[in-house]
Image: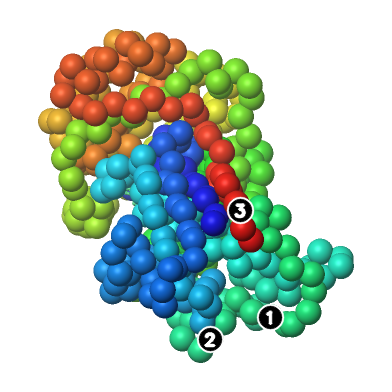
Amino acid sequence: MVRASAPGKCILFGEHAVLYGQPAVAVAIEQRCNITITDSVDDKWHLEGMIFKPEKHPHIDGLRKRLWHERQPLTINIDSAVPSGSGLGSSAALSVALAAALRAKRGRRVAADGSWHEGFSASLFQTDAYSKPDKGDAGHISPGGELLLGRAALDSDELALLGHAIEAESQGGRASPTDTATASYGGAVMISDRRERGFDWLCSRRLATPEGDRQWEVHRVKMPANIDQARLVIGNTGVHSRTATVVADVAAQLKQNPERMLEIETIGDLSRRGASALRSGELEELGRCMSENHLLLRGLGVSCPELETLIQAAAPTSLGVKLTGAGRGGCMVALTMEPTLTCGAIELAGGRAYISEIGCEGARIDRESGN
Ligand code: PMV
């Protein structure tokens, strides 16, 4: 049995603008997706007590093909505290947690010098996480080596790569690496179209999308200890919105009014200012940048009355407030030193509130036995 988990994410800066080459910053939150895998009792795959239907769960099927090719069937159980369809990265958390569980159970063959005999890596051209693995074991490179099992087999870069490939495959070829990188590495992550000076570069991601080839640079934003004095309070409006629809509306608006691209660039400037504040632990500046980012998002027409109600309720006890994710529903986020008060105010205003530390641990193995 293996139990693995990965965190949800909350975008602090740069949603929408990131689709036009500007940087975005996201943090891993306390709310996690927990996955347990065990050997199946029969010759069938099971999910949550039912027979697994691959067409209904493309994320799970994609990972099964890449990491569990022609192996003994498994029983998968999911216990997630990340609400789905709310812009908190629930599908990325699931994909990354399952990839971690499968890799830990399968193990990884490595050579004496630590180099891999199997696995998915951007630097190993023999294994391609992004192509459809119809021709057998895509993650296999060469026989031999020592078999590492459980935690020792895990690699955050591999999880981020697999997670992104699976999200792209399940979403018609369109997926930014934001959610999956945050779920894999944890902490705070900055995504940009270029390498950002002053931040630790982690990896590049390339994807052939229906709109053409895209490339992102993924960085870690290291945070000082005093960040721990503050909390995020996330308020869920309960209103579901489709990210693709909101993204398309913003695109249409920018096409009609090209001069509004200036606002997108201003969001990019705020992302950089916000990332610097996060890195240096300047909490008040961090909050100010968040609230300024919200005003620009509101100007782009992606807020809604329900989000504004929760934002107004949280503002008096917070350092900064904004919508998070695509908008027109979903969640808002407040940076606060008084999380209980902020949480109460959001709930009084009709929202469902979640308190989180800023930048939690990435994917991990929580339990392993019987390997
Ligand atoms: O709905 P979410 O949380 O996945 O946020 C989408 C963020 C956007 O910038 C609007 C889209 C994207 O793919 O980055």
Locate residue 51, reporting x and y percent.
30, 69
- Type of residue at label 1? Ile
Locate residue 89, reporting x and y percent.
38, 48
Kind of element beneath mark 3: loop
Image height of 272 relative to 143, above or below: above
Q: Earlier in the sequence, mark 2 or mark 3?
A: 2
Instruction: Name the quadrant containing residue 301.
Output: top left
Instruction: Name the quadrant containing residue 14.
Output: top left
Q: Which mark is residue 369?
A: 3
Q: Which mark is residue 141?
A: 1
- Note whether residue 126 is visible: yes
Instruction: Name the quadrant containing residue 299.
Output: top left
- List the residue tagged with mark 2: 136
Compared across the picture, whether 46 is left or right of 272 comes to left
Q: Quadrant of the N terminus?
A: bottom right
Which residue of the protein is positioned furthest toward the right in this rendering? 112
Query: Which colouring convention does the figure follow?
Result: rainbow
Out of 145 and 356, give the one closest to the viewer: 145
The residue depicted at 42 percent of the width and 64 percent of the height is 75
Q: What's the distance in space between the residues labelled 1 and 2, CA to CA?
A: 12 Å
